[in-house]
């Protein structure tokens, strides 16, 4: 079980990166799986937003790898930001008009719950240390 969770989290990151990079590059496979499935081609502003999203996901991967190595996460609000952004993303995907995009809830939920778990562990450790 200890190896299954990280494998699921990394698979979720891989899927998320696959989608957001697909939007940035304007790939056909991403058309029904992103932005409500409403575009025949992605506009420039949306590609820029998804490029920013790509950077956030890469940052999440780096932070998750640090968590697996029991290294400190700086700034301390990083995990909370990931949980909030993940919750918003999960709700947005769940409310999508596109059935293909609604499937994105699964990897979003996996990563969000993972960061929430680590946020809880870190909060507990900080309280214990004080």
Image: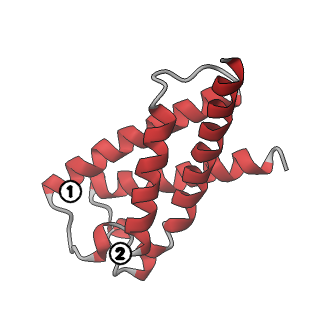
Neighbourhood count class around disc 2 (C-alpha, 10 Å): few under 14, some 14–19, many 20 upward: some
**Which residue appears at 46% of the width and 57% of the height?**
87
Query: 42 left or right of 57?
Result: left
- Residue 37: x and y, percent? 30, 75
**Residue that numbered label 2 is attached to:** 32
Neighbourhood count class around disc 1 (C-alpha, 10 Å): few under 14, some 14–19, many 20 upward: few
Whether residue 21 is situated above or below residue 90 in the rendered picture: above
**Residue that numbered label 1 is attached to:** 46
Choose between 61 and 117: the one closer to the eye: 117
**Which residue appears at 39% of the width and 40% of the height?**
56
Query: 56 left or right of 129?
Result: left
As drawn, the residue found furthest toward the right would be 1
Choose between 3 and 95: the one closer to the eye: 95
**Which residue appears at 54% of the width and 51% of the height?**
112
Whether residue 61 is situated above or below residue 30 in the rendered picture: above
As drawn, the residue found furthest toward the front would be 130
Name the element at disc 2.
loop
């Amino acid at each position: 079980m200890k190896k299954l969770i990280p494998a699921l989290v990394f698979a979720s990151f891989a899927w998320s990166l696959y989608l957001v990079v697909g939007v940035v590059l304007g790939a056909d496979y991403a058309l029904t799986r992103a932005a409500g499935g409403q575009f025949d081609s992605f506009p420039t502003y949306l590609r820029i937003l998804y490029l920013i999203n790509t950077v956030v996901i890469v940052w999440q991967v780096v932070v998750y790898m640090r968590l697996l190595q029991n290294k400190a996460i700086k700034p301390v609000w990083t995990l909370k930001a990931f949980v909030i952004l993940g919750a918003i993303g999960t709700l947005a995907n769940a409310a999508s008009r596109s059935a293909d995009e609604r499937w994105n809830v699964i990897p979003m939920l996996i990563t969000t719950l993972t960061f929430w778990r680590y946020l809880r562990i870190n909060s507990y450790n900080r309280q214990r240390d004080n």
